[in-house]
Image (tube, grey):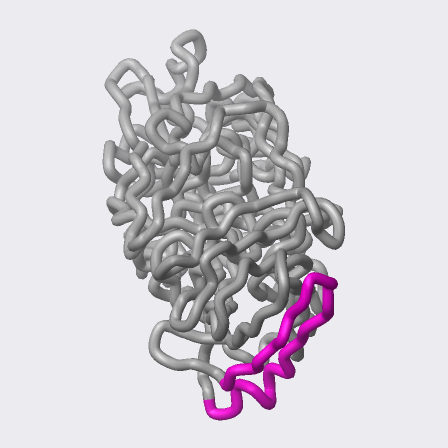
Amino acid sequence: MRVSVLVGIAALTVSGCASDSTPEDGNGARAGATGSVTPTGGSASWDSCNSVRLTMYPAADVAWCSFDRNAPMLPEFVRSGLTLAIPEPWDGSSYDGAPGEACGECWEITSLTQTRIAMVHDLCPVQGNPLCTGRHFDFDLSVETGQALGLDGLQEGRARRVPCPVTGNAHLSILGRDQWGSVRFQVINQRFPVRTIEYRAAGDTTYYAAERSAAAWAVSNEHRDMFNESSSGGTFRMTSARGEQVVMPNVLTYDFKVGSYFDLGAQFSGDSVIPGLKCEFVPPQDVYLDGYGGIEAASWVMNPWGSASPSEVSDGCVSGKCLRIAGMAPSMGFHIFYRQSFAPSTFKTLHFALRAELGAGVVDALLTSDTAACARTTFTVSEAWSEGSIDIASACAGIDSIRNVTFNGVTPLTLLLDDIRFER
């Protein structure tokens, strides 16, 4: 179990979110007390692409899920550190199981520039981690995963669950045992999350249910004799979260000590990936439409300078709410910026409505990055609403990346802006 550390975030304060059982409108859903989950982003299921908020932290090799991500039978991507901490509201996996079922589940994650698969290896608890309370689906990525995805701090992406691309059989990682037959273990290298585990004595036919032990498993004290130092051992039967039941043929004997790995002799079958599906993530097209576009803590954000003083108002707008920026003047203005830089070719045009509160005035509109600026487009505004637009390919020729919608004052005025949106 770990506490989230936001890596590479500057100039923003991330607001906490309440541990609320009600999903935030447009921003996904959180689990209820039973651990059930609801897809985000408007998709029909977790097999489809859903919005996910992405944070990063320095992960340990052994964490809440109680397995070492360096275990030799695990896929190379896991051994290279591509793991994540699942928020506590989703620790029952995407299949609505008991807490701990998420351990070992795999997710395909898409950023603006990369797609990678990562395995659940840790927990991001609600306590002390406001972004993990479930108001939006969130992955706290290992630094290795974040770097592989080209991330820099808190950002947004898309994700879908996938079968773990493992080879060989499922294994047990032996976490604890004694001469009286107690055994505590974790299942690793499984294709799908494990819903139930049963065990029986070698040569017997009666199965007994293993019990959840934090994020791992343990044989019950009542039926542990088959694993003591003088017994012949036992075998296991496992049911995946998808309902597939597999008899594991290999016998766990007393020879397998704490810290060893036991090959169960079988693997879950099947594949749940939608053929041909490819997730894509682009920044939110609505920059401001009755509110700043994007998800909580990773939305478009106002950043004024000089005498420019922005506020949100509901009077005199095209509809709903709009932005009122007093104090616009030569060399005064504002950015509406996004956390992630993106290629200008992501969108074709930027549209917006604008007017002056009293009289008339002139403003420049352009798209910018931290180091470059596209061509300015000058607009003369009056007290009547007018439509403005920027042809991005023409204005941003030769520019590699942008992250800001920028307005500069040319003459003094109070500017009103509404319905700021990109189109593809």
At 42% from the left edge and 19% from the top edge, which residue is drawn? 219
Which portion, as a residue range, is magenta?
A: 375-398
Position of 75 compared to 8: left or right?
Answer: right
| Above or below 26: residue 186 | above
At 47% from the left edge and 63% from the top edge, which residue is drawn? 328
| Above or below 424: residue 98 | above
Res. 404 visible in picture:
yes
**Where is residue 49, by image quadrant?**
bottom right
| Above or below 42: residue 17 | above
- Front one among 100 and 199: 100
Quadrant including the C terminus: bottom right
Any magenta on residue 379?
yes
Residue 403 x, y percent position in the rendering: 46, 69
At 70% from the left edge and 51% from the top edge, which residue is drawn? 317
Residue 15 x, y percent position in the rendering: 41, 37
- Front one among 113 and 306: 306
Any magenta on residue 385?
yes
- Front one among 341 and 165: 341
Which residue sits furthest front? 359
Position of 210 compared to 186: left or right?
Answer: right
Residue 408 x, y percent position in the rendering: 47, 71
